[in-house]
């Protein structure tokens, strides 16, 4: 009985390793600067332009500030990415968010939640190393991230469509193409 269980575990591990090798490589982070990202997003509707003006900023205020921002985006498609500087899967998907936010940032609002980073300077260093065309809200306690994403895990991406419908994606995005597909499907109703 124990031998059969051990054999099953070993078989699952072998399959997992094969699948891991087949997984596409993580998207490369963009080489665009914040200024170049902002330039590509010039002409965005006012609510989205306000986000682009805060590109790369780590905003205070936690859940109340984030909820106020979301209320101001009512009627827009919104993409919220919960991340943390210590989260390796978050690092693996940042290239996808950099590309998708520039590609679709005139049509959908992108916002980050830096959730459960106990050191603000670590979060700022991550944002400096991997700039994005939108701000993130600092959420040291993790409460805002949990409230918005209905999850304590990272990364998690939440899509709000223009009518307020919600779709939650657990785990990292393997490519900008997959993220853009989900933005169109779940935030832009395309």
Image (spheres, rainbow, N blue to C red):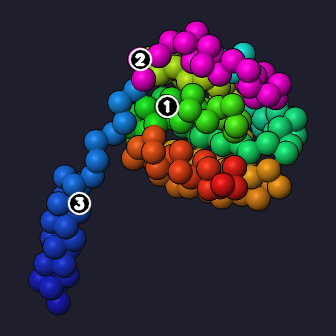
Is 164 in front, or is 189? 189
If you read the primary sequence from the N terminus, does the residue marked by circle 3 or circle 1 appear first? Answer: 3
Q: Position of residue 69 (x, y in %)?
A: 82, 33
Q: Position of residue 140 (x, y in %)?
A: 64, 31
Which region shows up in magenta? 30-51
Q: Residue at x 42, y 23 (%)?
A: 30
Question: How much space separates mark 1 and mark 2, taking CA atoms?
Answer: 10 Å
Q: Quadrant of the N terminus?
A: bottom left
Local SS, label 2: loop
Q: Which residue is mark 2?
A: 31
Q: Position of residue 143 (x, y in %)?
A: 70, 43
Q: Which residue is mark 3?
A: 19
Q: Is residue 7 left or right of residue 38?
A: left
Can you name the residue that lies furthest to the bottom here? Answer: 1
Question: How much space separates mark 3 and mark 1, taking CA atoms?
Answer: 26 Å
Q: Could you say which disc has been placed on residue 99 in the image? A: 1
Question: How much space separates mark 2 and mark 3, taking CA atoms?
Answer: 29 Å
If you read the primary sequence from the N terminus, does the residue marked by circle 1 or circle 2 appear first? Answer: 2
């Amino acid at each position: 009985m124990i031998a059969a269980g051990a054999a099953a575990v070993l078989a699952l591990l072998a399959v997992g390793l094969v699948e891991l090798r087949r997984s596409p490589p993580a998207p490369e982070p963009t080489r665009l600067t914040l200024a170049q990202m902002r330039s590509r997003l010039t002409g965005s509707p006012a609510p989205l332009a306000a986000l682009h003006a805060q590109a790369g900023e780590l905003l205070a205020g936690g859940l109340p500030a984030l909820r106020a921002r979301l209320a101001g985006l009512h009627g827009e498609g919104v993409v919220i990415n919960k991340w943390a500087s210590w989260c390796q899967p978050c690092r693996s998907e940042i290239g996808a968010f950099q590309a998708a936010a520039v590609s679709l940032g005139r049509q959908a609002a992108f916002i980050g939640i830096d959730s459960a980073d106990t050191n603000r300077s670590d979060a700022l260093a991550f944002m400096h190393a991997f700039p994005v065309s939108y701000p993130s809200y600092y959420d040291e306690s993790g409460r805002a991230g949990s409230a918005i994403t209905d999850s304590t895990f990272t990364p998690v991406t939440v899509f709000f469509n223009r009518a307020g419908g919600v779709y939650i994606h657990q785990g990292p995005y393997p490519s900008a193409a997959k993220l853009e597909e989900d933005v169109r499907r779940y935030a832009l109703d395309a």
